Amino acid sequence: MRYDELPPGPITFLPICDAQRTGTWRTFKPMIDHKRCNHCFLCWKYCPEMAISTDITIDYDYCKGCGICAAECPRKAIRMVRE
Amino acid sequence: MKKMITGNRAAALGSKLARAQVVAAYPITPQTKIVESIAEMVARGEMKCKYIMVESEHSAMSACISASATGVRTFTATAAHGLALMHEVLHWAAGQRLPITMVNINRALGPPWSVWVEHTDSMSQRDTGWMQVYCESNQEVLDSVIMAYKVGERADVLLPTMICADAFYLSHTSEPVDIPEQKKVDDFLPPYKPKYKLDVDDPHGFGSLSMPHQWYMELRYQMAEAMEHAKKHIPEVEREFAEVFGRRYRAIEPYRCEDVDYVLMGMGTMADTAREAIDRLRSRGEKVGFVRLRTFRPFPVKELRALARGIDRLGVIDRSFTFGYEGPLFTEVKGALYGTPQPPEIRGYVAGLGGRDITVETIEDIYRRLSKKKWKGEEEWIGLKMEKR
């Protein structure tokens, strides 16, 4: 591809996650205690990588381990565990 | 219809007439009245626009970037320290190629605290990839907002624009301003329709990463080219604007520069004062003109070279300073004229920092220095107390 065939600016045609498996960046891994979870979906809503699905499972190929889900969980059902 | 309004009000009305769809802004003196004025118009239902209150200028520009990426027309305003806080995200706006328009009320940076005019705030943002326009009247502020979208939104430009206006001399001073009819502005400035936008139904990744072997350098070259395209489009848009609204702007605006030996040069409101000074000097038989630089980025090299032909001396007045070197406009002008056949002798003057008034007498003083044959080869600071003579 030539530079003048590029879109204007850094625009990818895949969602950014598809461009790279960001799960390898992780130092801490979120672990869900499904007994405590009441399916409020806050983790699903807050996850910046859309790595949590509506059945409250985590896609570890893309989860960067940022810990936002654990911080937001009102039931303390998500624990961050060192990889 | 002509109305007596301040520069701040003119900026707000410019964004309304341009039909800005999202405004995210944070108040800072002397710009506060711009965002207050927009908030009032939105609250009254006079302006159909999403107004986002944010907690800082960094957030204001970040919100504008996201909004603009969704393909809507976006506006904000700031000044001095607010602009400095935006610095990082100014690069993001330009690098992502988003034609945001922002009015920056030029104000000196502290310390010492100052809320008065100086150009150093926007000069410090020179390399962010934003286009920069310096205004000399409230009318020009309003008109420039409308023209900025027209240039910036072109598919081969897609760059943001900073409209710079001098603190208090414009922001808080009322002048008669012709407020164009909405219909005419709508015809001149059609809605913004970018090819790529943030859209859940057609997802793209924005602000992506580029490895050294990938596209970073190519995307930067694209930006360099976009500025060159803007250089071509700006006079076209200014011409079209003149046809519709009857007011003609130029990247470089000379005043009585025909048949002269000396020319003074500056930006912003000092131009009006300088024209008065030129009239007085010309009536005394001095052969001197003034040129106002309106577009600082892209820098009008061609126009400047054409103007400099046949001039003996060019005096550049900077209302800002780069510590450890000289006034930034002085540097740029010398660079632009380097290598041209028989360039004029170029001398630099620093004046009006921190809102110190540039009067007709200041300009006459600068002319006296310029017209003297002897020169130490150093830039001079004008009006310093305890100045060595």
Image (spheres, coloured by chain):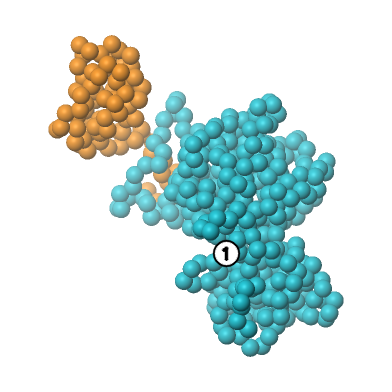
Chain colours: A orange, B cyan
Q: Residue furthest front?
A: B386
Q: Is residue B334 left or right of residue B273?
A: left
**Which type of secondary structure does the marked residue at label 1 adopt?**
loop
- Please name the residue shown 58% across and 67% down the image: B329
Position in image of residue B208 (x %, y %)? 37, 42
Q: Which residue is mark 1?
A: B320
Position in image of residue B5 (x %, y %)? 76, 44
Estimate how packed mark 1 is, as few (under 14), some (14 to 19) or many (20 or more) residues with alpha carbons within 10 Å.
Answer: many
Residue B278 showing in the rendered view? yes
Identified by mark 1, the residue type is Ser
- Please name the residue shown 74% across and 75% down the image: B364
Q: Residue furthest bottom?
A: B374
- Please name the residue shown 49% across and 51% down the image: B84
Position in image of residue B372 (x %, y %)? 68, 85
Vertical placement of residue B28 versus B232, above or below: above
Please state the chain letter of the residue tagged with numbered disc 1 in the rendered image. B
What is the tally of numbered marks visible in this picture? 1
Q: Is residue B53 left or right of residue B205?
A: right
Please name whichever residue, B33 or A16, is drawn nearer the observer in this view of the structure.
B33
Quadrant of the rendering where the N terminus of chain B is positioned: top right
Vertical placement of residue B34 versus A42, above or below: below
Q: Is residue A29 left or right of residue B180?
A: left
Vertical placement of residue A67 versus B285, above or below: above
